[in-house]
Amino acid sequence: MKLRDNARWDLVVPTSMGVRLVPENRQAVHVSDRYTLQATSAESNVASIPSFLGMNVKVLTKFVAGSPISQFIAQNLRARNMSYEGPWVDQGGAWGYRHQFNIADAGFGGRGPRVWNDRAGEVGLTLSVDDFDVKRLFVDEGVAILHLSGLIAALSPDTSRLCVELAHAAKDAGTAVAFDLNYRASFWKGREKELREAFTDIASLCDVLYGNEEDFQLCLGVAGPEAGGDDLADKIDAFGDMIGRIHAAYPEASYIGTSLREVVSANHHKWGMILWHDGETHVAPLRDIEVFDRIGGGDGSVGGVLYGILRGWDTEKCLQFGWATGALAATSATDYAAPADEAQVWSLWEGNARVRR
């Protein structure tokens, strides 16, 4: 896998931005009356790792003109060191366009977190390749990696076409393509044939494929692992067999990865990763992590792996960094990780939580 030289942008992500409402003090949504407002999307969560670590990141999205929520989101992206591009469209009245609302509590102990999505009228549903100057972006300026998520790819027929067309434009221009499958049953209901075709098209162009066993089975039709034991080694071996089938079906993929998670309680998880590259499988075994808010951990791990690839690191180092950025996301009240520097990430990997003065 070779990255394009002299690219203006290290990472570009298309996304439909929204806002996230989180109860204070880890309380449940249905009994809370005080919330924190955050800007959110799975794709910008991934992009936060390289953006906070100084790389050039661009978000392709859409805003509602005159909306204070749009202004809040745009300000947040700037604060996260991200550029953004996309049209500002008229709201069309009180019943017109808006941004999604994601209402999520973090859970506590034996009470698991709950998430409620409200995406009716979401402006990002209408995202189209015509909203962006694709030639300028990929040919004239240059992009090292285009990252796509199954959430934006399955959001609407328009966004599915957007992701397919961006993937083809990126590949034609020498840009590497990454895809986190992110299957969601509610997005796929009634659209299975259409989305299977779109996801298969995108995956056929990908240099990096990421997802869990269910993602690969339901999005791409890859046969799952044979039933194995409860032992971690058995699970890793079973997924290793699945990786072979994924690569046979999608030979362009240089990297294939997945996160490993066992939930002990809402605040205590066991966290691991598998990353395959060019015939070799690397494993970060399950380790105990403490969890402030679990949402975004998988996005954080993808962002860390992509950062490592952009830095030219070997596979083992990419895996370790991705494990640590995923674990870092879980320490934050936001659904994205905001690493201060590489040293902070490596300290987490090393299990060093001593104060740094």
Image (spheres, rainbow, N blue to C red):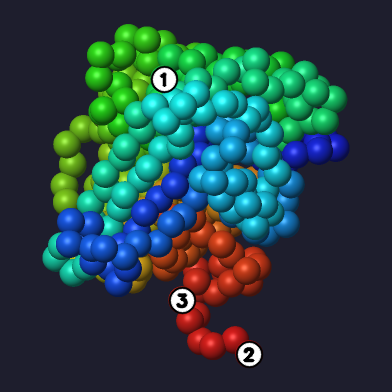
Identify the mark nearer the N-term, 2 or 3. Answer: 3
C-alpha distance separating marks 3 and 1: 42 Å
In the picture as drawn, the residue positioned furthest to the front comes out as 93
On the rendered structure, is 31 left or right of 241?
Answer: left
Q: 2 and 167: which one is in front? A: 167
In the image, residue 301 sits, relative to residue 16, either above or below, namely below
Q: Quadrant of residue 210?
A: top left
Instruction: Inspect the image, locate mark 3, and give the three-letter code of the amino acid beneath it.
Output: Gly
**Tag 1–tag 2 contact (CB < 8 Å):** no
Give the structural element (helix, strand or loop) at label 3. Answer: loop
Q: Which residue is mark 3?
A: 351
Instruction: Inspect the image, locate mark 2, and give the three-letter code of the amino acid beneath it.
Output: Arg
Give the structural element (helix, strand or loop) at label 1. Answer: loop
- On residue 230, the disc is none
**Relative image position of residue 24 (x, y in whole percent):** 32, 68
Q: Residue at x 63, y 38 (%)?
A: 59
Q: Which residue is mark 1?
A: 156
Discs 3/1, front: 1
Q: Can residue 58 be seen by looking at this rendering?
A: yes
Q: Quadrant of residue 317?
A: bottom right
In the image, residue 319 sits, relative to residue 162, either above or below, namely below
Q: Residue at x 23, y 63 (%)?
A: 32
**Tag 3–tag 1 contact (CB < 8 Å):** no
**Relative image position of residue 356 (x, y in whole percent):** 60, 86
In the image, residue 277 sits, relative to residue 121, either above or below, namely below
Q: Which residue is mark 2?
A: 357
